[in-house]
Image: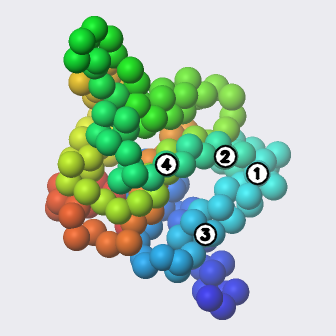
Amino acid sequence: IKAEGFKGKVIQLWETVMVRHGLMTVGIPPCGKSMVKDVLAATLAAIADGGDMYRPVTQYVMNPKSITQGQLYGEADLNTQEWTDGVLAIAVRNAARANGDGRRQWVVLDGPVAAIWIENMNTVLDDNKKLCLNSGEIIKLSPVTTMFFEVRDLDYASPATVSRVGV
């Protein structure tokens, strides 16, 4: 990637972050999706003293396809009915709690889109901004939380999901 093209992608990503709380970067690996995101995060951290718009970033990165649905969202033990949070639930809860610390919170799902987990994200990505868990808990995203999806393609993403994010 030429430097000017790369800088343009970083700027495009920042503009999307500013207007959407959910977004997808799409492209074949290794086209630079993660690098664009990481350069933007480093840039925001470098200029963090420039006011509220520019804050350091905390990233929670996971591959949703590498784990089960229960490990991602959480699940109840079949014997004890005790609830165990999944990694996404933990990340979103931590991001929601960090509202007042001045850091942007990016929950990054880096991996292929699968209908089995992406459809559960629709309430997070719409104007409700809430993650609804099977335990009955509802976690509201904070104003500083952005849901990132780094995907190869949108073959298994429904029109409902794609319409809720910046691409």
The residues tagged by marks 3 and 4 sit, at their Cα atoms, a distance apart of 17 Å
- Please name the residue that numbered disc 2 is placed on: 57
Q: Residue furthest front?
A: 79
The residues tagged by marks 4 and 1 sit, at their Cα atoms, a distance apart of 21 Å
- Please name the residue that numbered disc 3 is placed on: 36
Q: Disc 2 vs disc 1: Cβ atoms closer than 8 Å?
A: yes
Provide the secondary structure element on which disc 1 rests. helix
Q: Residues within 10 Å of mark 1 (few under 14, many from 20)?
A: some
Mark carried by residue 62? 4
Mark nearer the viewer, 4 or 1: 4
User: Which of marks 1 and 2 precedes in the sequence?
Assistant: 1
Q: Position of residue 3 (x, y in %)?
A: 70, 86
Q: Position of residue 31 (x, y in %)?
A: 52, 80
The amino acid pointed to by label 4 is Met
- Please name the residue that numbered disc 1 is placed on: 45
Examine the rendering and report whether any part of residue 30 can be seen: yes
At 66% from the left edge and 46% from the top edge, which residue is drawn?
57
The amino acid pointed to by label 3 is Val
Q: Position of residue 124 (x, y in %)?
A: 32, 39
* Left or right of 89, for residue 47: right
Total labels drawn: 4
Provide the secondary structure element on which disc 4 rests. strand
Provide the secondary structure element on which disc 3 rests. helix
| Colour convention of the picture | rainbow
Examine the rendering and report whether any part of residue 19 can be seen: no
